[in-house]
Structures are given as structure tokens and as C-alpha cells.
Image: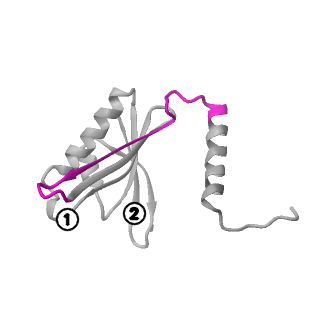
Amino acid sequence: MKGFIIEESTRKECQIVDDGIVKYNCSKVPFTQEPHFLPINRVIRSIDGDVIAGINSVLYCWNCLYVDILWVKEDFRKEGYGSALINEVENIAKQKGCKLVHLDTFDFQAKDFYLKHGYEVFGILDDCPSEHKHYYMKKNL
């Protein structure tokens, strides 16, 4: 290999890379949903209008749901807001034909919460971050 440069990508170049892998993936396993990527994001607001909880997820390519972030403000934890949010996006995904949900969490986050909601661990990265575990979880709907 000669004559190349590695440099930081621009936002436009990141999109070129994203589009390239999407095109390749679709050529190997045709996508089963339109649109190919459907964000399913929700928030819960307090009576005052403040965001106290939220979930960011995406239904992608083959009717799979990836939960990227589920967050509940500390003062409102253990009151059912997280359960309401995960149930909401799972129900929306199910209505759209989803059969599989996956996510990742750390040992200091919400592994037990997800286990309680029917998720199972399918992979663990030890010492990520140092002296902690990074869990990969899934649930069949």
C-alpha cells in the first residue's frame, strides 16, 4: 500500500462511509423495512415541562430495534418511568413487525432493569471501562 493519507473525516465523509456500508449490507441481505432507519425516540416531561426521562432508539433495516439510550433523571428513578419508556418503544416496534431488540449497558447502569424486562445477556466485555463490565443484551418480542 502506497500513496494514501489517513485524516479526520468531515461530517459529509462520515455520511459517505455510512452510505457505503448500508449499500453493501443491503446487497447481501435485502432490507425488510421502509424507511431503512426509523428513529423511535420519546421523552417524559414533568408537570413543569422539564424532561425527566427519555429513550433514543432506532428500528433498522431488518425490523430490528436498537435501544441506544434510556435515561431517567436521578430524582425520578425507580418510579416506573424507565419501564413506561421501554414498553412504549417495544410496542411501537412490535406494531411495525419487529421481533428482536438489542442494547448495551454497563454494570454501573441498568443491567438488572433490563433483565427484569425480559432481556438476556449475550455478550460481556470485561474491564471496559477499567474494572467494570459492558453488557450486550437482547430480547425477542
- Does residue 3 lie above or below 121 as drawn? below
Image coordinates of residue 20 in percent, x first then y, are: 67, 45
Question: Residue 26 is drawn in which quadrant?
Answer: top right
The quadrant of the picture occupied by the N terminus is bottom right
Residue 103 or 15: which is nearer the viewer?
A: 15
Q: Secondary structure at mark 2?
A: strand
- What type is the residue that disc 1 sits on? Glu
The residues tagged by marks 2 and 1 sit, at their Cα atoms, a distance apart of 22 Å
Is residue 11 on the magenta stretch? no
Query: Is 73 on the left or on the right of 124, as rendered?
Result: left
**Which residue is located at x 33 percent, y 27 percent?**
95
Say few, some or many: other residues with alpha carbon within 10 Å of mark 2 (under 14 / 14 to 19 / 20 or more): some
Residue 113 or 9: which is nearer the viewer?
A: 9
Say few, some or many: other residues with alpha carbon within 10 Å of mark 1 (under 14 / 14 to 19 / 20 or more): few
**Which residue is located at x 63 percent, y 37 percent?**
25
Image coordinates of residue 10 in percent, x first then y, are: 63, 62
- Does residue 92 lie above or below 120 as drawn? above
Image coordinates of residue 61 in percent, x first then y, are: 51, 35
Q: Which residues are magenta?
A: 26-50
Q: Which residue is mark 1?
A: 74
